[in-house]
Amino acid sequence: MRYSQLFGKTKTTTPHDENSVNAKLLTQGGFVDKMAAGIYNYLPLGQRVLKKILQIVREEMDAVGGQEIAMPALHPIELWQQTGRDKTADAILYRTKGAGDKDFVFAPSHEEAVTPLAKKFIQSYKDLPLSVYQIQTKFRNEPRAKSGVLRGREFGMKDMYSFHTDDADLDQYYEKVKQAYLNVYDRCGVKAYVVEASGGIFSDKISHEFSVVTPAGEDTILVCKKCNIAQNLEIAEGKIHNPHEKGEKELPMKEVKVDRGPTIEESAKAHSVPQSKILKSVVYKLDNGGLIGVCIRGDLQVNEHKLAKYLGQEVRPAGQEDLEEAGLVAGFISPVGLPNVEGGVKHAAEIEPKGEKGAHKDSYTKVPLPFVADHSIREVKNFATGANKKNVDLANVNLGRDFTIGDFTDLVSVDTSFACNKCGGKLEEVTAIEAGNIFKLGTKYSEAFDVNFTDEKGERKPVIMGCYGIGTTRLVGTIVEASHDEKGIIWPASVAPYSVHLLSLGDSDDVRTESEKIYRELQKENIEVLFDDRNESAGVKFNDADLIGIPLRVVISERNMKNGNAELKLRAEKDNKLVPLSKVMSEIKKSFK
Amino acid sequence: MRYSQLFGKTKTTTPHDENSVNAKLLTQGGFVDKMAAGIYNYLPLGQRVLKKILQIVREEMDAVGGQEIAMPALHPIELWQQTGRDKTADAILYRTKGAGDKDFVFAPSHEEAVTPLAKKFIQSYKDLPLSVYQIQTKFRNEPRAKSGVLRGREFGMKDMYSFHTDDADLDQYYEKVKQAYLNVYDRCGVKAYVVEASGGIFSDKISHEFSVVTPAGEDTILVCKKCNIAQNLEIAEGKIHNPHEKGEKELPMKEVKVDRGPTIEESAKAHSVPQSKILKSVVYKLDNGGLIGVCIRGDLQVNEHKLAKYLGQEVRPAGQEDLEEAGLVAGFISPVGLPNVEGGVKHAAEIEPKGEKGAHKDSYTKVPLPFVADHSIREVKNFATGANKKNVDLANVNLGRDFTIGDFTDLVSVDTSFACNKCGGKLEEVTAIEAGNIFKLGTKYSEAFDVNFTDEKGERKPVIMGCYGIGTTRLVGTIVEASHDEKGIIWPASVAPYSVHLLSLGDSDDVRTESEKIYRELQKENIEVLFDDRNESAGVKFNDADLIGIPLRVVISERNMKNGNAELKLRAEKDNKLVPLSKVMSEIKKSFK
């Protein structure tokens, strides 16, 4: 393609109404053009990138047995009424009226289309498993379109839906698709991590997000680069380092008068021990008004999302007033010898904790303020802690001997000081963009549409479903966010609009002739080439090449031709190299190996 | 692909709510599934056909320099207000409201998107010509969705738009695209004719339709199979056969008393001449109330669409009352010696006829009833005609000597008795489906959006536009309409979902093993194969194969295997042939040459 003829040239200024890196670079580079907020035209360069992504996505979905179909965007409202999403998703639905005054929605998702469609062809277990996908335009009435092509009102999506006889079959397929998704990102040249979605505190839904690491991502995740695991901060687990010797002998508990402030730091100082030797007790107020105490090792923090999920209700740290009302002494609270606290017991006893196995619900009636504890307190001997009296502490407090806790669970906020739970590797905090997600839908939609199958014994059962989405236009933006520098985009070779950017510098006949020759040869070899044949300065052409970000730049200039050379430079690397004109073609081919 | 695993199996019954052949066969064959009237799911088989069509379309558009882009479907209403199509196309627009109470339409066409987009990148003549296309989903609120996938409310379309400095450049490109379109249909295995669109009677728009010949097409066209030209009946031209000797001598005109009825047949009988010797005069009433006479050779018919287009207003045959009021004698009207007819003159004189060059507008004031004539009366001498008196005729009437006509134009209804105007070949009447159209838009949209360019002299001029559309999903249906028999679809090889339909008949191990072997070999050779591996009867499998319509059927059965054979049959042909199993692969490959 001759750049002089390409529709959608670079712009010298960045668009004033775009804040995100992807929108700035894609617009300035001539890849996209904004029609309205969240609604973009894809120009030839952008369309080429998109088509390469789609090809990769198709191949990977085909490889896991996905069958490509195409479902409509225009859905009769009745389909959405059947799942209730006409109400629950109301805010993002574009609605319209068709002939005969009929109500339609423009679909932001296709469970309401694919489920009744599958119903027509699923009779028995012989028709399962089944997996169908489409690459299609979605419409979502986002209250605020933002982040360029990352969150649009009209966007491209690959959505796949699978249908199974039982959970085990879904589980197996789910893992296959997870790997296919990782292949997609890998082939698109970006690093993606699978992250278990935190979900709402009431949600039991199993789903995973695929997070692509980018310098200015919207999400923060914890990754272990050793075993390639990433975690959502809200639910991250990690290996706690126990800094103390194992087998430490339990010393006799004693009461100690102290004159200290309420913090863990002050407590550790008062006892001349590390913070990890302090038994920390934090009191939370529940949604139902009751109080609950959380024990955790002094140097660690309570993760409130985990606590809320465990309790099945929202929590917030108890205020001074709450503590006083319950007769608790701020800074000196502990589960040891706790006085009767009416408020706490009364309300907290109503809680149905979702603990791990062996949780003793009874324990709530045994201790006045119900306590749960993080596992971190199990390994440490001879804690120092408050005595539930002002300026009185207890030293050498030991779990089991001096106090008991009914329920242990994972309540710790994991950060980069933790090791990877799986491999012990170092955890790192990185920012990322969500670039896909997969869900185990179970029977939610098959029950709504009454999609059943006859199993081998002749029994009718609801079909088990999974769904799997990648925003394809969003992925264009994600790649740009992940792969650019201050000069422009750096396209991974697999999704670059062209492989070679050929620049002719200067207007001499020699340069023209040589450039045209190389242009023809590249086309003959089926190497995709963008040929900047314009009558522009070297500066303009170099800047445009950096902005557009094609992997290999080949420069034909008078200066280099004098020495019989051409200049080759990889966009991702700093240095260029001179190559004899006779070897240009072979060197170009070498670059793609 | 194993048919046992394919999503979207055949149905044994035709859908009761579909009338068109395409919808019946596509639904029954498992290619599409109706979600709502005019809104279809494309199942894997249908999607495969569609993708093959899209590939052909892309290649042909690329070949004429079209650059692929993707424009949004969701348009701010302001764009449509700017061209006034928010009102003129109101009936077919799906409208919606987005965040911030903004009005949008879902686009049925993209002039309102592409024109402002092109404006951003067109500054000078150096940016022209430019041609961009997209393959995209269109939404059209059809009052009555009908004809299966031929006229949907949501449908796929390839729309291309071109931009030029002048009409000559557009004309040249228009012809290139016309040929590219013919290539598309040809490659899709259907015969298409270019037909000049008749347009409305007020329209000067130049546009062409591409008509694919089908047994039950919606349109009737006249084609010359010799030079491949087709014409819309409403505006068809043809070579008139003059049955009379040239150079016939003009005889003296004479009045003849007759006793005859008003028809041409009766007139010819009364004078003992062929109908072609009768000067026929037909009187029409205009929209403005005036009358006009049309002279045509007695054996030919007046084409009212041509007449209306010529006059720039609607016409209808004058009624008995109209004639009487004007003093005209039905059955005896002629332009010879016509008495003064006030009504006709008064009104018809206001007409601005759009005649050919040399039209004498003055003539309307010279004859009492204004007359126009078809060219067919020019070659004939010694006409018989009425004398504008009851039961009085004139014999040996000659143009020029006995009467004059101010304006000659083409007003004849052409039918299969005419010869091709271009090559003299035989004209045939066939039914067809419109499968694409192209328009010279001129400056209509560039003026609406103020899209100008600076020409070589530095002058600003509006850009000249063309647009070119193929309904891609409609083409799926068109191919089915054009290529099927009573058993099912007959896919042209280029767009068939698979090339080979492999059937294993019977459940013996030998048949299984041999079928699996051929299946593997076909896959290895990249020959697309659908393998009916189900445990179904031969009858079911044969019927399904005929219904689905894959070009080559390969049958492995116990009976044939006994003799070491497989059976090959082309869907489009009647006979099958037995081929030694050892030669199956080479015979299959031969079929595709």
Image (tube, coloured by chain):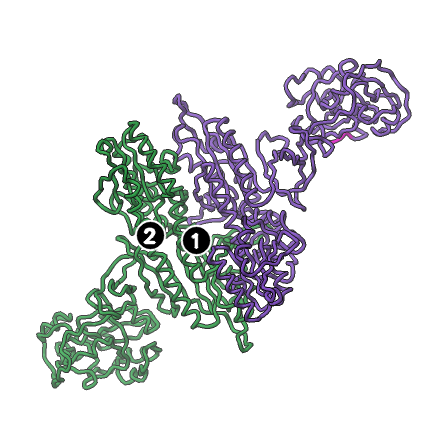
Chain colours: A green, B purple
**Dot 2: what SS?**
helix
Q: Amino acid at mark 2?
A: Thr
> In the image, A237: left or right of B297?
left
Q: How many marks?
A: 2
Q: Which residues are magenta?
A: B314-318
Circle 1 is placed at which residue position? A140
Tell me the residue at 39%/48% (across/down). A50
State the residue in front, A262 or A213.
A213
Circle number at residue A478: 2
Residue A357: x and y in percent read: 32, 80
State the residue in front, B443 or B476.
B476
* Disc 2 chain ID: A
Quadrant of the rendered image containing residue B557: bottom right
Quadrant of the rendered image containing residue B185: top right
* Residue count near mark 1 (Cα–Cα under 10 Å), binned few <14, some 14–19, many ≥20: many
> Can you see residue B500?
yes
State the residue in front, B91 or A20.
A20
Q: Select label 2 or label 1 by which is in front.
A: 2
> In the image, A312: left or right of B180?
left
> Can you see residue B313?
no
Secondary structure, magenta segment, majority class: strand
In the rendered image, residue A33 lying in the magenta stretch gets the answer no
Residue B107: x and y in percent read: 50, 44
**Dot 1: what SS?**
loop
Residue A8: x and y in percent read: 38, 38
Q: Amino acid at mark 1?
A: Arg
State the residue in front, B379 or B96.
B379
Quadrant of the rendered image containing residue A587: top left
- The CA span between labels 2 and 1 is 19 Å
Residue A327, compared with residue B573, is above or below; it is below
